[in-house]
Amino acid sequence: MPLRAEVASRWMEDWTGIADEMETQLRDLGTPERAAGTRRYLKHDLDHLGATVWQVRRVVRATGDARPEFSRDDLIALAEALWSKPVFERRLAAAMLLEARVELLGPDDLGLLERLLRASGTWALVDVLAGDVTGELVARYPDAAARLDGWAADDDFWIRRSALLAMLVPLRRDASFDRFGRYADSMLDEKEFFIRKAIGWVLRETGKRRPQQVFEWLAPRTHRASGVTVREAVKYLEPKQREALLAAYKAKRPTSPD
């Protein structure tokens, strides 16, 4: 067996060990004070090592750079090994690893992403897996977006949020607004903050390139939208459009999209 293939084979056999070594590096970088602060901030039950987001990203990058023969199977194996323990930084590393090597993934991997999203329990994991990883997949494989229709109607609000955020990358690349518009309209009356924020976030980002489309969509819905949605959505609109939407929201009435 050639040396490179032999080394690759050893890597394939010990993804758990590699994940554990990454955890050791992150534990050494973390502090108990930061771990306690992050746990309070994110309000979930995962263990924390106290490493920063940028420290996690650097460890992920170094791990990937050391493995030039990384394949899709390798990617999935290491991501699964990282995710297998209820440690926030490990799971964040798994999400960032999938983001960094998203070109290795295909539409069939949406099932894996949905499973990870259902186990996330916090925006800090959901937003990477949905906005960055799933969004890139849907942008590359537009037919795969139909899978999101089920997500948008799911009982789990994190999955519904994921359907919204997965449209960020496609919309930045001039995808049709229709699918996101349908999802957002179906969720516009929800009270869940993370849904309201996600709708506003996607509208805000879309407004950077397509302000008129955002204005026309939101104008007849200002009486239904929440304050957090409207305030986010209007950030990059023309002043007159922004003022019209804010006034209509305060009056709890729709306004004309003309």
Image (cartoon, rainbow, N blue to C red):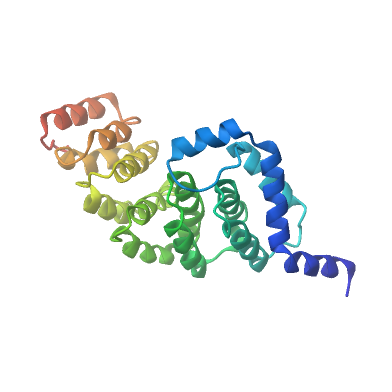
Q: Would residue 61 be seen by someone viewing this image from the given angle?
A: no
Q: Nearer the viewer, residue 103 or 79?
A: 79
Question: Where residue 222 appears, x then y in whole percent?
Answer: 17, 37
Quarter-of-image position of residue 72:
bottom right
> Where is residue 171 shown, x and y percent of the image?
40, 49
- Horizontally, is 77 left or right of 238 in the view? right
Residue 104 screen position, x and y as percent: 61, 62
In the picture, the quarter occupied by the N terminus is: bottom right
* Figure quadrant of the C terminus: top left
16 horizontally vs 247: left or right:
right
Residue at image point 30% right, 28% down: 238
Of 214 and 36, nearer the camera is 36
- Residue in the picture at 19% in, 46% down: 189
The quarter of the displayed image where residue 244 is located: top left
Does 92 appear above or below 231? below
How far across and down, in percent of the image, does residue 117 sit?
A: 45, 57
User: Is residue 55 among the parts visible in the rendering?
Assistant: yes
Question: How many tags in the picture?
Answer: 0
